[in-house]
Amino acid sequence: MKKKILSLLLVSVMALSMVACGSQPKDLSDSKANIEDFEYDISKNHISLKEYNGDLKTLYIQPNYEVDGKTYTTVLTDLWIDDNVNFVIFGNGIRDVNTSIFNSSEVEKVYFPKTMQVVYDKTLNYLHPDDGEKIQVYYEGTEEEWNSIFSSYERQTVKEAWNSSEDAGEKGEAVGESIADKLNGMMGSYDPSKFEYHYSVSKDSLEELIK
């Protein structure tokens, strides 16, 4: 009887641990979050993801989502990644992301598709590996193709940000981002030694990485 009670307690503890640590998918299909797990806005043919509220440790962000029977193109210029996620996969078709998308995240691995138009050093600079580790960056294309889209970020001055729009809301956001960029820059610039890059990563290779 004591052994049975101990076994039940062990199972309960393991179940609670899995819930607390988040859900670990077994393949790409499992890592595709439902649109209900995001906060989002819809405008015309686009769906702008704002925040992820799910529990997936590996998060596959799709290039399109369906809402009420209509398919929308995914926009990630306002998305922030939750600190529960440690591997982000941007689906083929994603073209750009919020330059601060990884701010305050715990992401250790990230995959970019060939459809990305640009990836800034500032974006990767928000990723911080554990001691003795490196952030793993996976890219669908070749090293040459990566070098053609990887770019140094040029920060807007506060004055430039203030003059960037006539809309008060947009003006405020631009100024806030300029100040945040300056503060982030004071913490250090992009250090390539903290990253390990993998090129020509296929869908099959991604499946193996998730397992």
Image (cartoon, rainbow, N blue to C red):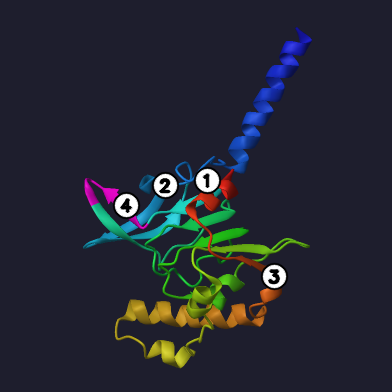
- Verify CB contact (< 8 Å) between mark 4 and mark 2: no
Would you say the magenta stretch is mainly helix, strand or loop? strand
> Residue 50: horizontal and vertical position, in percent?
40, 60
Question: Bounds of the magenta span?
Answer: 63-70
User: Which amino acid type corresponds to the residue marked 1 in the rendered image?
Assistant: Leu
- Mark toward the start of the polypeptide (3 vs 4): 4
Instruction: Identify the mark at residue 65; answer none if there is no mark.
Output: 4
Q: Residue at x 78, y 62 (%)?
A: 132
Choose mark 1 or mark 3, whichever is in front.
3
User: Which amino acid type corresponds to the residue marked 3 in the rendered image?
Assistant: Lys
- Verify CB contact (< 8 Å) between mark 4 and mark 1: no
Which residue carries the number 2 mark?
A: 37
- Mark toward the start of the polypeptide (4 vs 1): 1
Asked if residue 196 is among those painted magenta in the image, a careful observer would answer no
Q: Residue at x 27, y 57 (%)?
A: 72
How far separated are the C-alphas under marks 1 and 3? 25 Å
User: Which amino acid type corresponds to the residue marked 4 in the rendered image?
Assistant: Tyr
Q: Is residue 195 left or right of residue 123?
A: right
Which residue carries the number 1 mark?
A: 56
Secondary structure, mark 1, is loop
| 53 w.r.t. 130: above or below | above
Which residue carries the number 3 mark?
A: 194
How far separated are the C-alphas under marks 4 and 2? 12 Å
> Residue 196: horizontal and vertical position, in percent?
66, 66
Choose mark 2 or mark 1, whichever is in front.
1
The answer to whether residue 107 of the structure is visible from this angle is no
- Mark toward the start of the polypeptide (1 vs 3): 1
